[in-house]
Amino acid sequence: MDEPMNDAPGAQVKVTFTTNEVDLQLPEEKRQLLVPADIRRYGLSRILNSDLMLDSGSIPFDFLVNGSFLRSSLEDYLNSEGLSLETNLTLQYVRSLIPPVFEASFEHDDWVSSVDVLTSTSPAGRWSGDSFSRGQERVLSASYDGLLRIWNASGEVLVTSPSASHGGHSASIKAAKFISSTQLASTGMDRSVRVWKYTEPGASGQAELKPTLELYGHRASVDSLEVHGPSKRILTASADGSVALWSTSKSSSPEADASLLPNAHTSKRRKITSSITTPQRGPLFLMQVHNAPATAAIFDPRDHTVGYSISQDHTVKTLDLTTGTVVANLTLSHSLLSLCAIPRSNGTTLLAVGTSARHITIVDPHASAATTSVMTLRGHTNKVVALAANPENEYSLVSGSHDGTCRIWDLRSVRPASGGEMTEGGMGNVSEPVYVFERESRQGKKKAVAGEGAKVFGVVWDKELGILSGGEDKKVQVNRGRDVVRE
Amino acid sequence: MKSKPVEKKRKARDEESDSESDDELGNGLFDGVLEASEDEEDYIPSDEIDDGDSESEVSDGSEDAEEEDEDALLSDEIPSDDDMGKLSKGAEELEITEPGVDPKPKHQEEEDRNYKVVKDANGGERYVYDEIDPVYDSDDSDAQGPVNTIGDIPLTFYDSYPHIGYDINGKKIMRPATGDALQSLLDTIEVPKGWTGLTDVNTGNPLNLTQEELELVRRVQHGLVPDEGYDPYPDTVEWFTSKQETMPLSAAPEPKRRFLPSKNEAKQVMKLVRAIREGRILPYKPPEEREREEEEKEEVQFDLWQDEEPAAPNPMHIPAPKLPPPGYEMSYNPPEEYLPTKEEREEWEKTDPEDREKEFLPQKFNSLRKVPAWGTLVKERFERCMDLYLAPRVRKNRLNIDPNSLLPKLPSPAELKPFPTVVQTIFRGHEGTVRSVAIDPTGVALATGGSDGTVRVWELLTGRQVWSVKLSSEDPVYTVRWRPTKDAFILAASAGEDVFLMVPTHSSVTPTLDQASRDVLAAGFGYATNGQQPATAPGKEPAGKWARPGTKLEDAGVLVRVTVRSAVKVITWHRRGDHFATVSPEGQRSSVAIHTLSKHLTQIPFRKLHGLAQTVVFHPLKPLFFVATMRTVRCYDLQKVELVKIVQPGAKWISSLDIHSGGDHLIVGSYDRRLLWHDLDLSNRPHKTMRFHPKAIRAVRYHKGGLPLFADASDDGTLQIFYGKVPNDQLESPTIVPVKQLKGHKVVNQVGVVDIDWHPREPWCVSAGADGTARLWM
């Protein structure tokens, strides 16, 4: 330590601060600065927050140098890059990501396949508008035991969906989503999509969850479900390769195909007699667009008449949901398992696609084929089966994988792909995860082979509740997700 | 008659010895005459003479007189002249000298001395020694005849004299008789008929021989038979002939050799024939012709160097290294800085001559003429010569080959992606070994069968068990196989002797599909009840009994049970899903059975099998059926019911077999650790043999969804993934590259990975391990 002190007691590096954040722009004359060479992120952040600079108080900043985050002192960085101290460094400062600290776990009886939240900032909360009251944050979890559970933010089960004999799912639920503060939809391996009416615990004290509609149309397990509240539409993707668009309203739905109803053939099977009769309807459109299991389908975040679906047949299809036709087709090189949309501020939408080849590909569904694959996110060691975009910005997302980890990615931190990564189908730029967090239940244990016992099946990122993930460890894990929160 | 000549001869000898002691006068002449007379006497009675002295003369005496002359003429020049004279005189003196008295007695006292004392010119005594008379066979070669002492002068000087010179004793050497004189003498002598010039010893008369006697002598002399009438070469008289005699000389039966061709002769003849054939015996040619031919042969000359090109200088020649050119320090007048300082000089002198850097010290001289001679020149030259002689300047030809270049060019595994690399899902639930895995044709569900007697169906990606049934409490489920069509959802599993067909209906199977599957299974019961089952011999167990397995299993979805004669280890479906084949290795002749699902019919296609059947597989396109016994794979045509081909992998015990979806390639796994790739069009022998496992290979499987992959599962707990591209062009051979070894399964009781299956579309495979897990690799 003494040597650099003797060597350059006052070694200084000339840095130029830039940013993309509109509200944190520095005046032109303050952007260039001489800083000590051994300064680190914290010091730089302090300088930026000081009175002379931004006078912003205490916003933690991260600094991007040449597309990667500064993790060491400036001097070390320059040494590792082989640059001299005289180099003029351009530091892009961004609001710092705070590690997603573990906050709570919600225990289940069986594997948790999907999680959703209802808060004022979640889509369902926004769609409900005024009917959603503050402090009414809810967590919806779908489990492999065929039950839906609704939790309050402190981790108490408010209501559990009825069993199969009382109008519930007859098999594992694979996906569930809030449509509004009073309505939710679920689907699963019993091929049915169910719409539920949720009643908040009122004066009587008991919350209620009643099935209002059963939708039949898929011929195999339904793996993904997406809802759009205002238009009352549900989009599902099934293992039979079909994507279906449904309506939540009984009246606007066509009749269901009788052969697909569970009691269609009563010949020698034990009937699962339900005490509650729920109206059974069919899909608005059933699009047989894939020739392998379709694994996810979503609405375009800006235009609910456009949908995207992915499948194990390696394709991403853009669907016109008004006519039920395929508009665009994009073929990647691996089986695709999960999908989320990242709305960009410039009006376009990026799709993050999780693959069986353990990486996430960011594609632009609108661009021509040559530039579709924008970026590859590498780091997972198993299939990426869940993705959720950060609701607060357009450059970060969280992914859940069968390797038992969730990873947070920052699309701003990129580097060009090396040769070996190019051949593996990764195109364009490559990014590494910013944060990795494992299942809390596995803490301290040895890492499981193939993520056994720790697989993550569903993940959601909410502005208020943070990152919620459900998995094979029968828990919904809540991690702090307010990384860019402005105080 | 004989005694007389002997006596006479004795007398003559006595006289002779007297004459020998005679003085030198006339000695030379008389000697010859005496001898000649002696010869004549000795002629006839030669056999009786035992005296050694005269023996030598006998041979000469046997000659004719003329011949004797010739001999004498040849032997000596000068004495021959005397002989001529003697001859003539001898005949006359024969009578004269014999009775004659010699003057020998006068010199009796001087007989002992062989010299005479004479007075020389000065009056002093002079001893004159007798002439030493060498006897005929004396060793004295010096004794020449009278030698002419006249010196080197022409003989013409003596033409006018009767003599031609003087001998050593000063006696005249008389001129020999000339030819004319001799001839005239001979002419004067009338030779009577039959004259021999010899005396008959018996009668004393001159010996005359008749013409017959002379002829006899001549014949004897010529070595002929003396008798003139004797014919030494008379014509043969054929006493024994091949002709059949009317009265044969012998009554013995004719020997076999007379009429049997001689083997020995045949051998000899064959030897000759062979020699002629081989050119060892050549037909006769006159010597001159042969010589000419040989000359012609010799004339063929080859130009050894006609094709020679100027060669490069000998590559082995390496010139001796050049001496470095002299530098400034070698100059007689180097610059000052090259001159050694005092310390340097001392140090140089101190060091051993061998350790010195330089063998000289620079020195400065005013002029070149002051430079002394180089003291160590000879030593240096010698050392350099020694260096040249001892240093082995041989260019070593090292084999400079990059070992990597010898390896065959294989594409790098990274270029051959995708293929499974890591385990992504573990299916845990079976107790004991997972015996079999199968992914359903849609690629969503995985079926496993285990030693615990259960069949389980799993969601492939998540590893969630969605269905299970316990088929048997004792027997393990050896194999599970999906019916390979998508119109129904039927799983076949074997436990013990039973094959169960089931519809593992979990909730994501639509009722329609479920019902369709049930209908497929139930269709055959109509056949059974209609009695269309082939009649089996009474008392003989039918090949397969089709029945419902009982309500408990039926409620779980197991709808049909087929019982065959012995435990089923392998089930293989035909691609259309109406037939499936089972193998029960212990089942002897009924080990292979083909079942028809739509008719609930079981047939045993082979009356006899060569060896224990291990596994079977249907050809993916043609009506062919492959049966693997322990050592061979037999291909049968099911339509024509005939054996098409026998493939011999060379393995000792085949464990598993799979056929490429193109139908032309076969992989065979064996318990003796080998994986064999066969090109069925090419050969019955393996195209490629791979040994990648230290333990037995239990299962091999091609990817059936269009990816060029295949894999094997081994008892060492690993799977080996291969890239195996079958080219469209039939002429090219398939590319086979091992790309990945998948490790993860634990070995339990020396059993590792038991079964393997590929996903129908993706490069994913599932393995069943003895550690109770199935694993999905992707």
Image: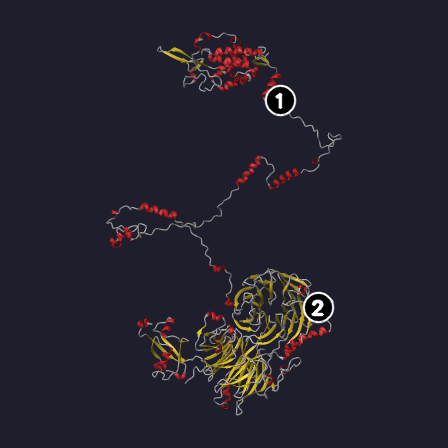
User: Residue A372, image x and y in percent?
Assistant: 49, 76
Numbered badge on residue B225: 1
User: Mark 2 or mark 1, which is nearer the start of the sequence?
Assistant: 1
Give the left or right position of residue A194, taking residue A25 as reference: right
Residue lying at the far right in this picture: please name it. Answer: B246
Residue lying at the far front in this picture: please name it. Answer: B474
Viewer can see residue B30? yes
User: Residue B654, image x and y in percent?
Assistant: 60, 63
The answer to whether dots 1 and 2 both sit on one chain is yes
Residue lying at the far bottom in this picture: please name it. Answer: A203
User: Residue A206, image x and y in percent?
Assistant: 54, 89
Quarter-of-image position of residue A281:
bottom right
Query: Front-most of A421 and B540?
Result: B540
Circles 1 and 2: CB atoms closer than 8 Å:
no
Separation (CA) of disc 1 from disc 2: 118 Å
User: Residue B433, image x and y in percent?
Assistant: 58, 69
Quarter-of-image position of residue B266:
top right
Disc 1: CA contacts within 10 A as few (<14), some (14-19) or many (>=20): few
Chain under disc 2: B
**Quadrant showing the N terminus of chain B:** top right
Query: Front-most of B313 and B647?
Result: B647
Give the left or right position of residue A49, taking residue B183 as reference: left
Give the left or right position of residue B282, taking residue A407 as reference: right
Please state which amino acid type lies under the numbered disc 2. Pro
Residue at image mark 2: B542
User: Looking at the image, is A26 positioned above or below residue B432?
Assistant: below
User: Looking at the image, is B281 positioned above or below residue B367?
Assistant: above
